[in-house]
Amino acid sequence: MEKKDINWGELGFSYQQTEKRFVANFKDGAWDEGALTEDATITLNECAGVFQYAQTCFEGLKAYTTESGDIVCFRPDLNAARMADSCRRLEMPVFPEEKFVEAVVETVKANAAYVAPYGSGATLYIRPYMFGSNPVIGVKPADEYQFRIFVTPVGPYFKGGAKPITIRVSDFDRAAPHGTGHIKAGLNYAMSLHAIVDAHNQGYDENMYLDPATRTKVEETGGANFIFITKDGKLVTPKSDSILPSITRRSLMYIAEHYLGMEVEHREVLFDEVKDFAECGLCGTAAVISPVGKIVDHGKEICFPSGMDDMGPVIKKLYDTLTGIQMGHIEAPEGWIKTI
Ligand code: PLP
Ligand code: COI
């Protein structure tokens, strides 16, 4: 397979159009077969449900080239299941989970020239999404939907790759109690745009959102879950009904326990506890694990002992094991790796 002439090492996290994308349409109560197309443009009625009432959700996963040259993706069945949950919550039709995985495989295969070579530091980001496509003016769900998958080669989500970042405690909330924080609805990200622009303007890389009801518990950031390491080497990660159930976080909990012999606590995490942790990181498909060096809460700084230069030692072990499994040089648990 001849790869595209891309400067893989220089890629950031941005969109670059690739050759083929998958498109399926839902009409009269049923999905069509779906097919690949070269057309990257969508033409919709001005009153389409997605434009009026933001009826849209999405997923994110990656394809990797392993050490032995295979192209693989990581736990796509969990993205299929989470997208089904998002669709049910947003009154959208579920795209069948097996077909979701097949469509991911088909789309990656058709764009294999864009899957970064092993060791290049880049990956192929896969973006499945769905939206209401027919005109809707009264507040109600659409009757017609489109499901699409495009792919784009990406580098690190945060500039500087593995360098620790500085985040701030946000005054804005991203999700309401009993709202949509636990699904991957586009509206959650619209909610976070003002907060992230403001954070960047103030010199911070990301926002830490606290629970909206009491503002005492750690939730997540705009695009990743938190992991913390205690001074005695335990993994602690927030449990909440209003955060996205990160596939990376669930995988890291398993890796910590079964590969690294660590104790794992998945529980409510009070913001007051954060100052006592030894290491902090953000985990997600895009973020992988991005170490956090400093958290600023209205001028008060929490500086982790792991510092601002490198990942802390325990997060580094988790990072190496996770990426080792994804890149095929550490044996994966049954069912984690889907060969394309
Ligand atoms: N939390 C939010 C709000 C996200 O957007 C993402 C990204 O998908 C995550 C967490 C991490 O989830 P995952 O590890 O499944 O990519
Ligand atoms: C991901 O990690 O896949 C995300 O969706 C996070 C962000 C890019 C929205």
Image (tube, rainbow, N blue to C red):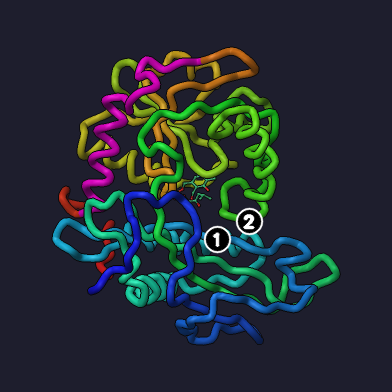
Q: Residues within 10 Å of mark 2 (few under 14, many from 20)?
A: some
Identity, as a three-letter code, of the amino acid under mark 2: Gly
Q: Which residues are magenta?
A: 302-327
For the residues bearing labels 1 and 2, Cβ distance under 8 angstroms: yes
Residue drawn 25% across and 73% down?
2
The image quadrant that residue 154 belongs to is bottom left
- Ligand 2 has an atom within 8 Å of the beta carbon of the residue at disc 1: yes
Measured as percent of width and height from the top left, residue 128 is found at: 50, 66
Q: Quadrant of the N terminus?
A: bottom left
Identity, as a three-letter code, of the amino acid under mark 1: Phe
* Residue occupying the far right of the picture: 138
Q: Please determine whether, in this image, residue 32 is positioned above or below residue 135.
A: below
Looking at the image, is mark 1 or mark 2 earlier in the sequence? 1
Q: Please determine whether, in this image, residue 115 is positioned above or below residue 159.
A: below
Measured as percent of width and height from the top left, residue 16 is found at: 47, 63
Give left or right: position of 299 versus 70: right
Q: Secondary structure at mark 2?
A: helix
Measured as percent of width and height from the top left, residue 100 is found at: 44, 71
Residue drawn 39% across and 22% down?
308
Q: Is residue 75 visible?
A: no
Q: Secondary structure at mark 1?
A: strand
State how far apart marks 1 and 2 are (Cα). 7 Å
Q: Which residue is mark 1?
A: 58
Give left or right: position of 295 versus 316: right
